[in-house]
């Protein structure tokens, strides 16, 4: 098993094969966490390995006590955050695992200790199934296709001037179709993206494929990117699309019937006695959880 030491062992007597085999036993939680702790492994290939065939896990170096180390970038992939967030955790939390090797700029951390810390601080959860992201991509001439990315890693930019990135394992056919949809001058649009750890997102244009990585086992990992300022929250329903909303200049009265969002933005309804259509001039793309709408509004005002 890759990642954690066994919690015990059991001896199985194969009498008809003439001997006793010692089989190590592992904690079920450690097994479930392998998807997170080993994000670089194409687990689809592992699950599809037929009996009698050599698993790709056999090609990994054996884990020795204290020798299983990760860099900050891999910790970020485990927690589905940016590297800057992990640097901030190191600075703010005195119980964050200390480096076991490396340098101040590129510290090497003990993988089991990092996984345990992430669990205790609710940065990760024990998965109940292999994580996947589903996305509806709209290309030129409104051609629409659905895709699945296994082991997804979604990083949302901290401001509207940055760029969001989504990567995951894909098939060759899906990767080719994704690239074709995004090959136009303005890229493709995301009608709907559903990924672990975030609400449904939508992106109006400029989605492109920036990397296709082939692992040693043959798995293909695809990375998409788009300007963070175009990100929005998806309309309810499978078709997707972007929700547009208003930012009220003052608190709303109890009589307000407009639909509200966690960021304090709302979708104005024409029959609302307080807002009506008055908010239309200040409509902004809803930020879907990664950006605060106030930041977007201030940014637009500063440019004006």
Image (cartoon, rainbow, N blue to C red):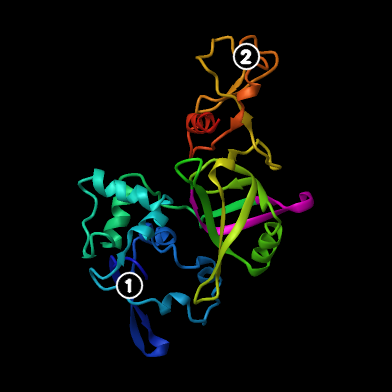
**Image mark for residue 200:** none
In this view, the residue in front, 242 or 168, is: 242
Which range of residues does the magenta coloring cover? Answer: 136-155
Residue on which the image places disc 2: 275
Query: Residue 52 at x, y = what percent?
Result: 51, 82
Q: In this view, does 232 lie above or below 90?
A: above
Query: Residue 280 at x, y = what percent?
Result: 65, 22
In what element is the residue under mark 2?
Answer: loop
In this view, the residue in front, 71 or 247, is: 247
* Residue sitting at x 49%, y 77%: 216
Q: In which quarter of the image is residue 220?
A: bottom right
* Number of disc labels: 2
* Residue sitting at x 42%, y 49%: 81
User: From this viewpoint, which residue is outermost toward the right?
Assistant: 141
- Residue 85 within the magenta-colored segment of the rendering: no
In this view, the residue in front, 228 or 301, is: 301
Q: Relative to residue 137, is residue 67 drawn left or right?
A: left
In what element is the residue under mark 1?
Answer: strand
- Image quadrant containing the C terminus: top right
Residue on which the image places disc 1: 24
CB atoms of marks 1 and 2 within 8 Å: no
Q: Is the magenta stretch mostly helix, strand or loop?
A: strand
Evaluate whether residue 294 shows in this view: yes
In this view, the residue in front, 75 or 204, is: 204
Q: In this view, does 155 lie above or below 173?
A: above
Evaluate whether residue 200 shows in this view: no
* Residue sitting at x 29%, y 51%: 117
Q: Relative to residue 291, is residue 257 drawn left or right?
A: right
- Residue 137 within the magenta-colored segment of the rendering: yes
Dot 1 or dot 2: first in sequence order is 1
């Amino acid at each position: 098993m890759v990642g954690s030491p066994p919690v015990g062992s059991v001896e199985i007597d194969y009498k008809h094969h003439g001997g006793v085999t010692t089989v190590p036993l592992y904690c079920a939680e450690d097994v479930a966490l392998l998807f997170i702790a080993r994000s670089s492994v194409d687990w689809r290939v592992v699950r599809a390995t037929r009996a009698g065939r050599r698993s790709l896990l056999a090609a990994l170096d054996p884990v020795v006590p204290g020798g299983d180390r990760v860099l900050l970038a891999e910790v970020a992939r485990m927690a589905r955050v940016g590297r800057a967030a992990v640097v901030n955790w190191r600075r703010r939390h005195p119980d964050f695992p200390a480096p076991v090797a490396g340098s101040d700029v590129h510290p090497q951390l003990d993988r089991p200790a990092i996984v345990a810390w992430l669990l205790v601080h609710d940065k990760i959860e024990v998965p109940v199934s292999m994580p996947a992201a589903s996305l509806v991509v709209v290309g030129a001439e409104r051609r629409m296709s659905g895709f699945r990315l296994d082991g997804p890693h979604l990083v949302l930019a901290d401001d509207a001037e940055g760029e969001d990135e989504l990567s995951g394992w894909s098939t060759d056919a899906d990767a080719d179709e994704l690239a074709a949809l995004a090959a136009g001058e303005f890229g493709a649009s995301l009608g709907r993206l559903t990924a672990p750890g975030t609400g449904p997102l939508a992106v109006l244009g400029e989605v492109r494929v920036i990397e296709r990585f082939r692992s040693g086992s043959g798995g293909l990992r695809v990375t998409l990117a788009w300007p963070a300022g175009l990100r929005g929250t998806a309309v309810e329903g499978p078709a997707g699309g972007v929700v547009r909303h208003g930012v009220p200049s003052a608190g709303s009265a109890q009589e307000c019937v407009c639909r509200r969002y966690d960021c304090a933005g709302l979708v104005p309804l024409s029959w609302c006695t307080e807002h009506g259509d008055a908010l239309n001039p200040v409509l902004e793309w809803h930020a879907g959880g990664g950006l605060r709408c106030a930041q977007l509004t201030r940014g637009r005002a500063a440019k004006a």
